[in-house]
Image: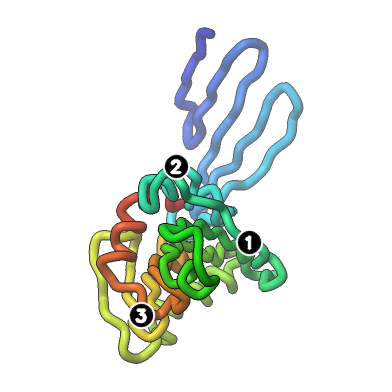
Amino acid sequence: MNKLLLLVGAGVVIAGAGAAVIISKNNDNSVKVTNTSTGQSQNIKTGDNALISVDACDVLTETVAKQVLGEGASKGDTSAGNASSDDVSVSNCTYTFKTVTSGSALAQAQSTTATGLLVRAAKTKAGAEGNKAVFGSSRPAGVQDVSGYGDKAYWNPTYGQLNILKGNNWYILSHYTGVNPAQGTLDQAKQLADALKNNLK
């Protein structure tokens, strides 16, 4: 398909087969996208103001889980949506891998490696500010800065969680073996973070 790209003042026109999309920059760090065939327009935030919807299982995919846990990775419960609010959408995704599949339930649980991701995706400016505050003025005591992930990141040893801020969204990663998530180590969390960091939005 041939497309024509024209720069028109402060706008960009992308023309395809019988339709064009006009993109013009606004003063509030957003762009206005107009479909000329339907006449419909919408403002899309850009840069630091972008509010991007994220589902945890789109970040912690089955492919990522198998890379971290092995081919036997099994998807777990994802019911975290009841924690959502008007300002933040909360989603959860977990996978487990059992190395012991017989014997007592406790022995099986203690041999199970689990990996999980909880995402707090900002839906409003207030939600974005709340997420960012956890990496600034409301940052918990006793955490350790971690570089190389998102815009900011820290390790919380109390809960065995790696917290990552990317744009306006807050990602909470855990990766551990046994029955207590707090037993997870930073190295384990980094293994998960390295596998999924390209999926952060």
| Element under disc 2 | helix
In the image, residue 12 sits, relative to residue 132, either above or below, namely above
Gap between marks 2 and 3, in whole Å? 26 Å
| Element under disc 1 | loop
Q: Position of residue 20 (x, y in %)?
A: 62, 21
Q: Position of residue 113 (x, y in %)?
A: 42, 63
Residue 101 shown left or right of residue 34 in the figure: left
Gap between marks 3 and 1, in whole Å? 23 Å
* Residue depicted at 44% across the width and 86% down the height: 138
Q: Which mark is residue 193?
A: none
Work out whether residue 8 or residue 176 is closer to the camera in this orientation and state it: 176
Label whose residue precedes the other's in the sequence (2 or 3): 2
Work out whether residue 143 or residue 124 is closer to the camera in this orientation and state it: 143
Q: Which mark is residue 156?
A: 3
Q: Position of residue 150 (x, y in %)?
A: 34, 59
Between marks 2 and 3 in the image, the one whose residue lies nearer the viewer: 2
For badge 1, the amino acid type reads Asp
Where, by quadrant of the figure, is residue 121 drawn?
bottom right
* Residue depicted at 54% across the width and 38% down the height: 24
Work out whether residue 103 or residue 154 is closer to the camera in this orientation and state it: 103
* Residue depicted at 36% across the width and 80% down the height: 156
For badge 2, the amino acid type reads Thr
Q: Which residue is mark 1?
A: 77
For badge 3, the amino acid type reads Asn
Q: Which residue is mark 2?
A: 63
In the image, residue 33 sits, relative to residue 190, either above or below, namely above
Q: Are marks 2 and 3 in contact (CB under 8 Å)?
A: no
